[in-house]
Image (cartoon, grey):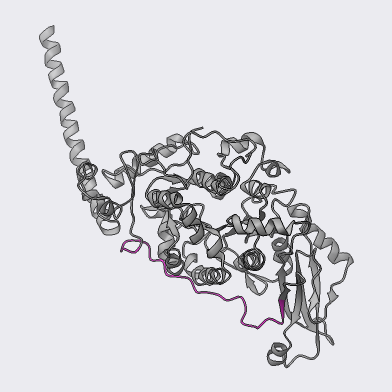
Amino acid sequence: MIRYNGRKLIYLCMGVMGLIFLLVNHVTNDSREVDKAWQIEIDPITRMNISNVQAGGLDQRELYKKFFVFSSKCKMPKVNPFVEGFPELKPLKFKACTDEPSLVSVIYDLAKKHYMLHLNMEKSLKNFANYSAFGCTYFEIVPGAADIEAYLLLFFLCSVKAPEYFHQDWVVPSHFLGVIVECHEMANKSRVLQRDAFAFVQHPKNRNEANDALRGAQYPSVFLFGIDSMSRMNFRRSMPLTSKFVRQKGWFEMEGFNKVGDNTLPNLMAILTGRTPRQWQSLCDVRKPGCLDSLHFLWHHFHNVGYLTAYAEDLSSISTFNYLKMGFKRPPVDFYLRPFLMVIGQFLQTVEYFGFKYCVGRRHSFSYVFDYAKQLIERFVFEQPKPLFGLFWTSSFTHDDCRGGANLDGLFLSYMEQFKDYGLFEKSVVILLSDHGSRNGALAEHYTGFLEERQPMLHIYLPPWYRKLYPSVVEALNLNRNRLSSNYDLYLGLRNFIEQTHPRMDYFRNIKCDQCLSILKVLPFNRFCQRLQLFDLEFVEQKLINEENIYGQVKTYSLYSRTQ
């Protein structure tokens, strides 16, 4: 009996060893094919002996030519976005919204702090000579108490009130959020020469100007410029002009920055509230009125220490806080552009491109947001400094097409250059960021799409005076460039700008997070990157197994969320 059992055990072991031999040969053959593809399209890091690197086989400078992040607990291989093997991404044809000169322009009187509508008579005589005498009317856009109320209010006004004519250099009342203007022949009013729309950054009332001047000299204004669905790799590939701009002195690129949620809302909520979806969903239902108004955002904290606040996003139909949600019952910030954009989107002619309203009236929908930002910079950075916190977000070029950045690049750079002329980069902190990379389409379907989707761009600019005053922040950002960071770290970093001037600031319901650290302070080198708490864990684990098979020896994860 003993001999029989021993013989059976020997046969069983031989059979298992044979299966292992076949399996090893099969995996080896598969890995050879993967290595070949890796060599063609990505830096050939799988040929590198990882243990030798950890033991000092490569110095740090050489190491970061191969990896965005490299530690014993987290490795993110660096993808070269310019090598062969990526989908061919030829830019789509750029479309201008109009080639006509403007009949109406806006002038600001700094001494009197008001706007005027100016008729460009020379341009009208030159370009509209075949028209008879014309007149121009305006229709007021007023800020509503809620997102939808401004839209309904305009429909009501249109039914009971006719547009009014204005004369040369007509003074815009100080309560106007914006106007829609129309110029037409007087003899035939149905013959319209031009329709246009203008938003106004009105001088705030009931402000202590002396205190504002003092704050403006001591507090850094903070401007966040966001481009939807833009990874750091596609940013380099599709927006070379802007990419070159943010490589100037004072800019810091966070190559280890990772998204923490699937789409825009959880990623922006992490930056603006510091909360995970589980946390803010436990407080209220964003599909019900008043929920978003009850949450504490960063702009509330900045407002409490004397900052003016602003928020503008170009596509009102899919905006972050309104798509399948109820939005805000009250304007969340001092300067809120959404009511204006909702109205002009209904009353001006629109052109769709990249899947959304590309042109609204005579301008790109993106331009309304960045013209609004330019006004804020003119008024409160250049002319009469006041501290300001603003978020300006654009989706119209890039949300549904990874090629859209190429069309946006020149326009975006032009605004950055104008902002530079107004002194923005001498006085203010500027952050260029995205929510995530391409989630569908050619880049997402490429086998490097796992990296593309999870690594949005993040560039942080510190003005010269701030770098001199806080050298420890400069040192931290230099070190953090190739360390794992997330939206929660950015949230705490933005709070730091308040804490540096108000160390006893009360942040209401302060959120406990042992894993979160300010991005303005040195982040740990050996951070774990497999903290996956926002998605179905079985799905994510299987995804990671698949990616590990692709990348061979290198595991690639993302810091999706912090520990609850």
Tell me if I can see residue 317 in this picture: no
Left or right side of 160 for 118: left
Of 367 and 416, which appears nearest the observer?
Answer: 416
Give the answer, above or below, for where 80 lies relative to 96: above
Q: Position of residue 481 (x, y in %)?
A: 39, 51
Q: Position of residue 165 (x, y in %)?
A: 84, 78
Quarter-of-image position of residue 442: bottom left
Residue drawn at 61 percent across, 38 percent down: 280
Left or right side of 136 for 314: left
Residue 65 lies in the magenta stretch? no
> Where's the N terminus, which quadrant?
top left
Of 514 and 543, which appears nearest the observer?
Answer: 514
Residue drawn at 77 percent across, 71 percent down: 112
Tell me if I can see residue 301 in this picture: yes
Residue segment shown in magenta: 82-106
Give the answer, above or below, for where 549 lies relative to 79: above
Q: How many marks?
A: 0
Q: Position of residue 219 (x, y in %)?
A: 60, 54
Q: Position of residue 538 (x, y in %)?
A: 43, 34
